[in-house]
Image (tube, rainbow, N blue to C red):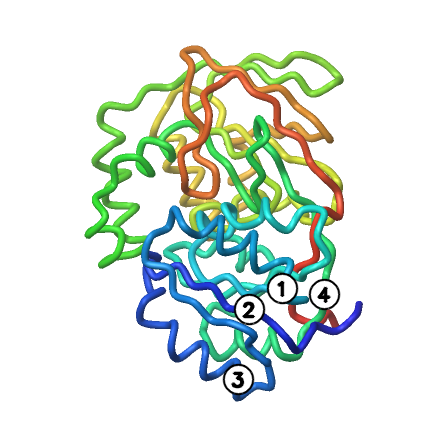
Amino acid sequence: MPGLPKRAILIVNAASRSGSEAFEEARDKLVEAGIELVDARAIDHPERLAGEVTAAVDRAPMVIVGGGDGTLSKAVDHFLGKDAVFAFLPLGTANSFARTLGFPLDLDGAVDVIANGEARPIDVASIAGDYFLNNAALGLAPIVAESVPRGLKKSLGRLGYLIWAGWSAASFHAFRLIVTDGRGVHRLWATEVRIANGRFHGGLELIESADLESGEIVVQAVEGRSLLKLAWSYLTSAVKAPARHDTVREFRGRKLRIETRPRMRVSIDGELGPETPFEVEVIPDAIRVAAPREG
């Protein structure tokens, strides 16, 4: 794999969990590591991020985006069809994409990868034209994403999500899922659906068969109507118990259609997306990302 460019633009979402605190330190450490920063900006208003990234990918051979999974997925659209390498600093709550890529979660480790890593082509997924890097979900996750208090998320991180998920579960019900995968139409009851380009969801490795370079999407459903079974799925996955495989069914392919009864909104890397029904598809080798050197 080729090495990474030494000229870059840094854009940090200051509204992400640790973005505002990390910006100046990240800028200084990148320069110390030998990265020539053409520009460096901390964005206080997330709605400005798209415009900043769009301009940056035409001005530098590498753009470094600092933020959580939602920030990275919003940014990825602007790298499609461009030569710029997508580098990032994991400054969010779960940092699931970083975990999927094997990317260090600490600032020093992330800077070291950006300075000494390699450019790796990866797949990007799309739901109804909304591109994302790692994972989307139906079920309890979008409810939590939409309603979790910002202060709880920022102060407690993943623990805050878990507390709010437990609170939200009291009013949550299972739903009917219909998956069309090119080989048939599959109907089942489910409490959660994970639409995976990468292995991690909510900071846990839940979809072990997913691969950023496979050219396929994995749809993993927690089957049944019991919320206790959903909790068991998370627990057994967290400790890598063999029973984790008994709670889920998986479907995979280049393009799949997802329907639910009732209609539900999807959470895309932690941000709310469109309602069902929709199609999800993969775009193989869509972008190049800064990644740790293999071997």
Lower sequence index among marks 2 and 4: 2
Q: Are marks 1 and 2 in contact (CB under 8 Å)?
A: yes
Quarter of the figure with the N terminus = bottom right
Residue type highlighted by circle 4: Ala
Structural crowding at the residue carrying mark 2, measured as other residues with C-alpha within 10 Å and reported as few (<14), some (14–19) or many (≥20): many
- Asked which secondary structure carries label 1, the reply is loop
**Mark 3 vs mark 2, CA separation in Å:** 11 Å
Image position of 108 (left or right of 169):
right
Q: Which residue is mark 2?
A: 9
Image position of 67 (left or right of 200):
left
Q: Which mark is residue 295?
A: none
Q: Where does the image place residue 157, in percent across and percent down from the top left?
A: 30, 56
Q: Which residue is mark 1?
A: 59
- Residue at image coords 65%, 43%: 124
**Mark 1 vs mark 4, CA separation in Å:** 18 Å
Q: Which mark is residue 31?
A: 3
Q: Where does the image place residue 142, in percent across and percent down from the top left?
A: 37, 32
Residue type highlighted by circle 2: Ile
- Residue at image coords 62%, 60%: 86
Compared with 77, 279 (above or below) is above
Structural crowding at the residue carrying mark 3, measured as other residues with C-alpha within 10 Å and reported as few (<14), some (14–19) or many (≥20): some
